[in-house]
Image (cartoon, helix red, strand yellow):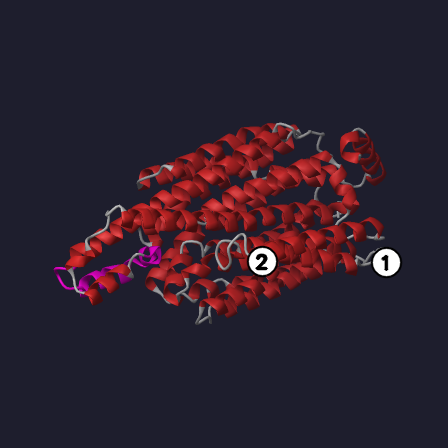
Amino acid sequence: MEHLTQKKKLTIMIALMAAMFFAAINQTIVSTAMPRIIAILGGIEYYTWVITIYMLTSTIATVLVGKLSDIYGRKPFLLAGIVFFIIGAFLCGTSTTVFQLITYRGIQGLGGGILMSATVTAVGDLFAPRERAKWTGIMMAVFGFSSVIGPTLGGFLVDHIAWKWIFWIFLPLGLVAFGMIWSMFPKTARKTSESIDYLGSLFLTLMLISLLLGFSWAGTKYDWGSSQIIGLLAASIVFLIILLLVERKAKSPVLPLSLFKNSIVTISNSIGFLMNAGMMGAMMYLPFFVQGVLGISPTNSGFVNMPMSIAMIFLSTMSGRWISKSGKYKRFAIAGMPFMVVGMLLMAFMNNVGVAVAAMIVFGIGLGISMPVFTLTVQNAVAPTQLGVATATATLFRNLGGTIGIAVMGTVMNSTMSSKLEAAVKAGEGPDLSQVDPETAKQLSSFLNPQMLLDQPKLKELHATLPEQVQPMFTHIIEMVRSVLSDSLTVVFLFGMSLLVVAFVLVLFLKEIPLRSSNDMKAKVEAEQTELIKKEPALNA
């Protein structure tokens, strides 16, 4: 699409940014509100599933759409993504149980995966890598802007209005985005020479489902060593082996194995996996600290997240411009990752709002500098004909990292919390319940649950309804649970930091090739990629 005029490209970018903002705002608006929604619907043990199901369906949609959009063009998938997202968001607002919410979030995830994959790839169609860096930074800034207003707005809505409006308030924007894409985005002819890899798509989907279910259920629904988890993980390995055999012979593979012979693609995807595992897994539990440990309302919890988003918006926009101007990208990854590591370290030891805000700012600086880099490196390292599938593969690894990170850190948090709570009770840190009658003791014991901390109004209401002589015991129990939750979250954040340290080490091994200034030099680009692969005998072995 490089033949389009600059004015037409700008018009298309406005439509893409509207679609990106619609998907992003519907994600960020639920972040601070979700703990309260789960507390209202019940089922804190399924909290991770509300996030995981979205990641699962969006991951599958992302990787399948990547190849299909290379064949059929981006427009039909952009439109389909918006439709699925609107339907899923509307149904989420009608949920009366946590299981309904999980189901509808799965539908929303399908739309989100399609939309995010097609949007990012469409930017690659419009601009060559050198100019693309600037627009990638702007798209990340759009996502960052949604991160500024989303959490605060979500907290306000759940504090003052029915929570269903969190999912419904931006539905009109989805209709606007649909109309803009329909009218502004150009159609592309189908590549008739390309065939659809149905068998590869099937086994890729089966592999992802079994892998993500295994990690999502491990430590929550089933023990890590249970036959169910071992069976799921074993099945994912079997499906992976079959997938590799199928893709080696496929005429037009859904996941071209040749991509992974390129060290830039492999290392960039590995970094994306680790970054998202550390970031998503840890950031998911930040509202637990702000609302559960500090006792801050969801509205004010959104303000704590705001500095991170503002820092990310400014620096992602600027780093995109700097990358476009210099044609270099590795220095930005090296500069950004240490900020993320330090930010996560501060999260591990934060004990007040001031430290939490400082941690958010430092983390946001690192995120803003490094975020535009790793999709760009992948897109720049492959031929334009593989742009869609390469972008989808990069997104796949990030989503896998986020899903597995959430699952593993959920297990880390739950197991740490259980052991610390048990140790605290045995050590006599809680009140002496033998001083009250058995029925009151049983009622007080039921408060040994971190879910209680996520609904502050209900907590105050319970405190007021208890007999005056029992209220000090209730306060003592709540403070003990707060301390246990805080200690458990420290372990979670330190684990996330360790993953980011490994990602930083991998950045040092990332090769840098000049950003191309054209998408039209197909033959030259493919020759460059072939030459690059030949220089990597270890990876070709």
Q: According to the image, label 1 marks what residue?
A: 192
Q: Residue at x 71, y 38 (%)?
A: 380
- Which of the marked residues, 2 or 1, is nearer the chain's N terminus? 1
Q: Residue at x 18, y 63 (%)?
A: 464
Q: CA distance from mark 2 to mark 1?
A: 46 Å
Q: In the drawing, does residue 449 fall left or right of residue 250?
A: left
Q: Are marks 2 and 1 in contact (CB under 8 Å)?
A: no
SS at badge 1: loop
**Where residue 360 appears, x then y in whole percent?**
42, 40
Range covered by the magenta-colored residues: 449-470
Estimate how packed mark 1 is, as few (under 14), some (14 to 19) or many (20 or more) residues with alpha carbons within 10 Å.
few
Mark number for residue 227? Answer: 2
Magenta region, main secondary structure? helix
| The magenta stretch spans residue 161 | no
Q: Nearer the viewer, residue 523 or 367?
A: 367
**Where residue 319 appears, x then y in whole percent?**
56, 34
Q: Residue at x 54, y 44 (%)?
A: 277
Residue flagged by tag 1: what amino acid is it? Thr
Q: Is residue 62 at least partly visible in the picture?
A: no
| Quadrant assignment, res 533 | top right
Q: Residue at x 65, y 62 (%)?
A: 79
| Quadrant holding the C terminus | top right
Residue flagged by tag 2: what amino acid is it? Ser
**Where residue 90 appears, x then y in whole percent?**
51, 69
**Where residue 463 appears, x then y in whole percent?**
21, 60
Q: In the drawing, does residue 176 fall left or right of residue 240?
A: left
